[in-house]
Image (cartoon, rainbow, N blue to C red):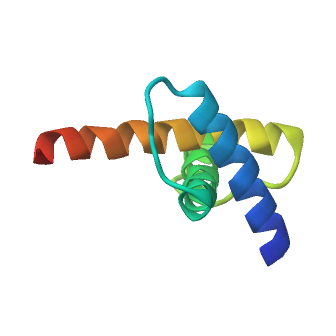
Amino acid sequence: MSIIAWVVLGLLAGAIAKAIYPGGQGGGFLSTMVLGVVGAFLGGTLHTFLTTGSLQLVNTGLTLPGVFIAVLGAMLAIFIWQSFNRRSI
């Protein structure tokens, strides 16, 4: 996948995840993109593990199912990030 596709997938998945997830996450353009890219990797890896049983670091593509999996992964990343931040305060 090209860099431009990574940026588009990251922005799309991160923005959708931030809109769906309750509470305020803060952050700007760059944090939304990074959240979406991390979500694509996290969601793709979990999807591969659940469907094949093998743990591989994979990403999702710029398709409708790929964006859906990336949004779920980004929401999981938000949950994990907020869990760590609450404990450190």
Residue at 71%, 54% in the rendered image: 11
Q: Is residue 1 visible?
A: no
Residue at 59%, 64% in the rendered image: 30
Q: Residue furthest right?
A: 63
Q: Residue furthest bottom?
A: 3
The answer to whether residue 36 is above or below residue 47 is below
Q: Quadrant of the N terminus?
A: bottom right
Residue 62, position as x, y percentages in the image:
85, 53
Residue 16, position as x, y percentages in the image:
68, 36
Residue at 32%, 40% in the rendered image: 82
Q: How many marks?
A: 0
Residue 66, quarter of picture: top right
Residue at 55%, 54% in the rendered image: 35
Q: Quadrant of the C terminus?
A: top left
Q: Is residue 38 visible?
A: yes
The answer to whether residue 64 is above or below residue 5 is above
Choose between 14 and 65: the one closer to the eye: 14
Choose between 13 and 40: the one closer to the eye: 13
Choose between 7 and 2: the one closer to the eye: 7
Q: Report whether 37 appears left or right of 67.
A: left
Q: Report whether 24 appears left or right of 17.
A: left
Q: Report whether 79 appears left or right of 4.
A: left
Residue 39, position as x, y percentages in the image:
58, 50
Residue 40, position as x, y percentages in the image:
64, 52
